[in-house]
Amino acid sequence: MPTPRPRSSWDSWGTEPARLPPAAKAIVATLLPGKAHPVRRRAAPRLTPSLLPDADFDALAGILGDAHLTRTDEGRVLHLGGKSTPDLLRRRLDDPQAAPDAVASPADHDEVGAVLRLCAARGIAVVPFGGGTSVVGGVDPDRGAHHAVIALDLTRTAALLALDEVSLLATFGAGTTGPQAEEMLGARGLTLGHFPQSFAYASLGGYAATRSSGQASRGYGRFDDLVHALRVATPAGDLALGRSPASAAGPDLRQLFLGSEGAFGVLTEVTVRVRPVPAATAYRAWSFPDFMSGAAAFREATQRGIRPTVLRLSDETETRVNAAMGGHLTRLRGCLAVATFESATASEAEAARDDLDRVFTAHGATSRGEDPARSWERGRFASPALRDALMDTGVLAETLETATTWANLPALKRAVTTALTESLAATGTKPIVLCHISHVYPAGASLYFTVVAALTDDPQTQWRRAKDAASHAITDAHGTITHHHAVGRDHRPYLEAEIGTLGVEVLRAVKAVLDPTGIMNPGALVVPPAPTERA
C-alpha cells in the first residue's frame, strides 16, 4: 500500500499558492499597461445544495459504509471538477459552485461495480474522479438527465496489486497516483517513467482514461503505449482486457477504454509495463537559429531512431520568455532545445547524447551545455501553479495542445498562433503566444501552446472565444483537437470534425451498450442518444 498523497486545493492547481519569479513582474507590467482586472481567490465557496435523496444515500451507504460516503460541503468542495482556466475562474466568482450531490469512495473493483449497478437502477449519474486534474472539463459534476450526480473518488483503490518481475508488468488500483506508483516500484528498483505536469496529483486510471503523454514520452512512450491490461466496471457488467503481449483476437477492446474518460465505465485496475530505474542520466541543450530549423532537426533525429528520454523545442517567443523568467538574458536569441538521456550506463547515455548532437549540429544548432536541461528538469512540474498567481494580478495564462504531421507543422503553428492573437486582440488585450514541441513521432509532432494576456472584466467569455477560435483553427488546419489533454466537455463540440458523424455514432453506440441508462460522466466525450432515439 502506498503513502497517502496530498489532494490539490479546490480553487488552484496545487496545495500552496505559487510565487511569481521576480522577472515575471516585468512581463505582467508589459501586459497590463492600463487597468488590471485581477480575479481574487475566495476564502470558501458557496455550493449548490445536495439533491441526493435520503433513500439513495442510504442504499449507497449499504455498499460503501457510512465512512466512505459523504454529502458534507467539506467532501463535496474537493470534487467541483477539474483545473481548467474556466474552472478556476468560476471558483473565484460569487456564484454558487456546482458540486456533486455526494462523494462515494469505493475500495476496489467489486465495490465500484456494485455502486454502478445501484446508480443505473436509481438514475444517479456517476463521475469517476482520480486526481481531478482535467483541464478540458472532463470531471465536472454534471447530472445530465438524472436527478443526482455522485463523484466516484477512486483514492481508496490505490495499491500495487501484483508485480511480475520476470515479465516486468505491474498491476495497480486505478486511483494510484504517479508518485505513489514510483514509490512502490522504486522500492523494487523499477520505474513506470510517466511524468506529466499533473504528476503530483493525477492517477494511473486517469492517465489511461485520457491517453496521457508524459514529458518523457520519447524515451518511455505515451501512457497508452505502456498499458498491458485493464479491468473495467461498467453499468452493463465487467471486462478484463489484455492477457498477452500481442494478439490477433479481433479488434483490441482496450482501445475502447483508453481515452474513454469515464463515459463508458470505470477503469478499476491498470496493468502497465515497467522498467529498471536507469543508472545514469546525461543532459544537453542547444539553441537553433529558428523554430523550423529545430523542427527539421527533431524530425531527422526521430526518423533515424535516436531516442533521448526527453526532447523539447521552444519557439523564439517561449525561449525569450523562459530565459527572462530564469534570469538567463544571454539566451534570448534563437530557439532552445533540451534533452535528457537515461540508460543503464553513463557511456550509453552519453553515446545517445552525442548521436543527437551530431544531427542537431548539422542543422545549425549551437550547444548550450547541460545547465538549461537540468534547469528545465528541476522546474518541470511548477508552471501550472503559476497560472493561479497570475490570475491574482489580472493575467490570463492558459495552454492548449495539438499534433500533426511534420509536413503540416508550420501551417498548423501559424494558424493557431494567428487565431489566438486575433481573438484576444479583439477583446482589447495584447497577448503573448508561446509554443513548443514536446512529443515526437516518425510521422509528426505535438504543438503545445501557452497564451498569456491581460484579463478583461469578463474573463470567462474572453477565454471561451479565444479557445473556440483556436479549436476551429486546429480542425481547419488538419490538426488533432487534442494530443494528450483529452476531449472532456471543452473539446467535444469539435470532435465530429475530426472523426466524422459516423465516428461519433460509433462512440454513442458503444455507450448505449455499456451504459444503457447514460449515467456515466454525462456530457464528457460524447453525448448519449436521447431516450426517444434509443427507443
Image (cartoon, rainbow, N blue to C red):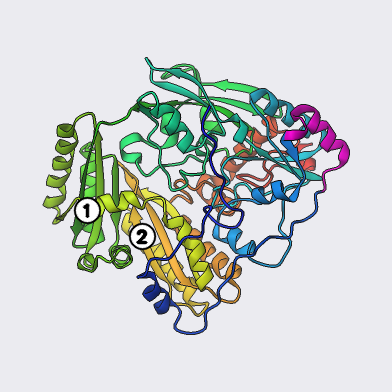
Task: Identify residue type, mark 2.
Answer: Cys
| Residue depicted at 88% across the width and 36% down the height | 55
Q: Main secondary structure of the magenta part?
A: helix
Location of residue 257 by image quarter = top right
The reply to whether residue 407 is in sight is no
Location of residue 231 by image quarter = top right
In this rendering, the answer to whether 2 lies above or below 90 is: above
In this view, the residue farthest toward the bottom is 34
Query: Is residue 243 found left or right of 457 in the rendered image?
Result: left
Tell me where residue 531 appears, x and y as whole percent.
Answer: 79, 41
Query: Is residue 310 found left or right of 95 in the rendered image?
Result: left
At numbered mark 1, what does the secondary structure look like: helix, strand or loop?
Answer: helix
| Residue depicted at 80% across the width and 38% down the height | 123
| Residue depicted at 52% across the width and 56% down the height | 16
Q: Which residue is mark 1?
A: 371
Crowding around mark 1 (Cα neighbors within 10 Å: few <14, some 14 to 19, many 20+) is: few
